[in-house]
Image (cartoon, coloured by chain):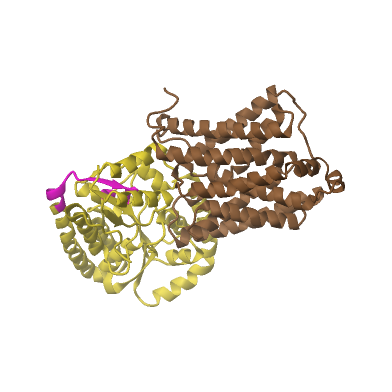
Amino acid sequence: MPAYRLIVATAAGAAAALLVSACSSSAADTNSSAGKVVAVGAENEYADVISQIGGKYVTVSAIESNPNTDPHTFEASPSVAAVVSAAQLIVQNGIGYDTYMNKIESASPSSSRKVIDVQQLEHLPNSTPNPHLWYKPTTMPAVAKAVADDLSVLRPKDAAYFKANVTKFDNSLKPWLAAIAAFKAAYAGTPVAVTEPVGDYMLQAVGADIKTPFGLQADIMNGVDPSPQYVSLEDSLFAKHEVKVFVYNQQVTDSLTASFLATAKQYGIPVVGVYETMPVPGYNYQSWMLAEVNALRKAVADKVSTERLVP
Amino acid sequence: MTVFAPGFFASSPVHVALVIGGISAVVCGLVGTFTVLRGQSYAGHALGDLAVTGGSASFLANVSPLWGFAGIGVIAAGIMDMIGIRRPRGRDLATGIVRGAGLGLAALFLYWDTTSSSTTGVSITILFGSMFTTSTSVVPVVLAFGLPAVAIVAILFRPLLLSSVSPELAAVRGVRVRLTGLACLLAIALAVSLSAITVGAILSTALLIGPAAIALRVTNTPGRAMVTAALVGLGATWIGIVLAYDSFYWPPSHDGWPVSFFIVALIFFSFLVSQLFGRRPGRVIRAEG
């Protein structure tokens, strides 16, 4: 995370913290009166999993769900601080992706609040280069289980219900995992280009060969200018047809990614759109992930683009 | 290590940078000489800061930041003229107030940029420039803003010079001092917008006044100073682009250093050298704008 963004995040966190003290009590009162566990997912894919596990016993809100904005540059507002500070269960990504959550949580300490930090859950170091953990097939089953464990502490008598939902969730992931295995069997080693690393864990899972250097991906993710060498290299991947698919992050875009998109189309490279947050409406986590793998398959097998999963 | 790292001349991002940076440097050198002569460096700096406002607004409108840089510059130049940039005593105050208000708006626009649409890297692009990622479609716009700026200083060369040295004398000789001043301010605003797309809004004064200050040290006529400033700016920009390209192979990240750093550093060191070894130390032509 670049320094200027840290400063922005710190300032936003501090401002939010000031306002939390004024807002939190009223928010907590109204929410707890419904008798459900108040939960928050920092990104809407985590909120979706909480909701699938908690079912009728939770009210879940997501902080980041706008498919047209870049979560990397998200700035927390006082209303976000109010929602987070009132939550009893929180799931956040970690690895510097949603640092504002930690700031708000420490500004409104609560001994009973459960926080699932997916980075810690998966024992990943802070130096993990790719923060987009939700594209990794092993991530969400672990999150689902951790959510069920914490909900069972908050509502012990409904533990069996939560456990059943975890089983249901794990089963519902099978079509996606099967699609990954099928793609890998048929098309392992397929060369692909990307803009930034959002879908890399999925691409690695399906055995794709990511030709875009990670330095360029990191530059685009962090919003700094890449060197001209990287720009030329990416352009030549398309011009020389060295890749079969261009995996395009629809939420981390700038004039450079737009020019890559135009070049890819010019040379007839199929495009697959990937997302930082779950595209809504129309998807839950598992149908979103399945749609991404199906889109990849359509691109490789039929040379058909799926630029966007939502209009 | 070779001067031109492999692929330099074949790289299309480099071509665009050489063209855009080259035009901007020449325009800034020509206009910047008058900026320094007229003692309007602070106005030039303020216009650069205000370019942040225009740049962040242009991202909201989804157009090249150059439109915002130039648009806000022209508006700000008009406001500064209206509220008294001509009077030496009110000048810094008028400039400072417009600059403060503009940067406040920039804060709002940047917040809207990042919360309402996907504008990754918007701050870096506006503040420090993104020459290597600029589209070729911007080149005609660069020319469209650069040519009028050069035309203004070329056509108004004599009256501008006279009113820079002595507004009273110029007025007696029939020069419309205020109109000339406004035209010059517009030329500065356009030059700053080009500088902003080259090295970024925050650094744009460096390219505007740096080469001009160096040129005024080492030459003795305004005409020669303008040509020298254009050449110094062009040299710093093109060498900066070569170094930025080469820096891909340098530590720490083997990822390249920002081109705006090299350009501004080259200008700064050239200025230091011109201060130490300039032919006419201490004799900068000054005007009581």
Q: Residue at x 26, y 51 (%)?
A: A268
Q: Residue at x 46, y 72 (%)?
A: A27
Q: Is residue A34 above or below residue B251?
A: below
Outermost residue to the bottom:
A34
- Report the front residue among A283 and B53: B53
Please indicate, yes or no, whether residue A186 appears anywhere in the rendered image.
Answer: yes
Give the colour chain A carries in the figure: yellow
Q: Residue at x 83, y 42 (%)?
A: B166
Q: Which residues are magenta?
A: A183-201
Q: Is residue B206 above or below residue A186?
A: above
Q: Quadrant of the C terminus of chain A?
A: bottom left
Query: Where does the image place residue A55, in percent across and percent down from the top left?
Result: 27, 71
Query: Where does the image place residue A211, in percent across and percent down from the top left?
Result: 27, 41
Tally of numbered discs: 0
Please indicate, yes or no, whether residue A199 appears anywhere in the rendered image.
Answer: no
Question: In which quarter of the view is residue B79 placed?
Answer: bottom right
Query: Where does the image place residue B89, in percent across and percent down from the top left?
Result: 81, 49
Give the colour chain B carries in the figure: brown
Q: Is residue B137 left or right of residue B171?
A: left
Q: Is residue A64 left or right of residue B76?
A: left
- Report the front residue among A114 and B90: B90
Question: In which quarter of the view is residue A283 placed?
Answer: bottom left
- Whether the magenta-drawn stretch holds residue A188 is answered as yes
Query: Where does the image place residue A71, in percent across and percent down from the top left?
Result: 41, 56
Q: Is residue B234 left or right of residue A86?
A: right
- Whether the magenta-drawn stretch holds residue A30 is answered as no
Q: Is residue B33 above or below residue A206?
A: above
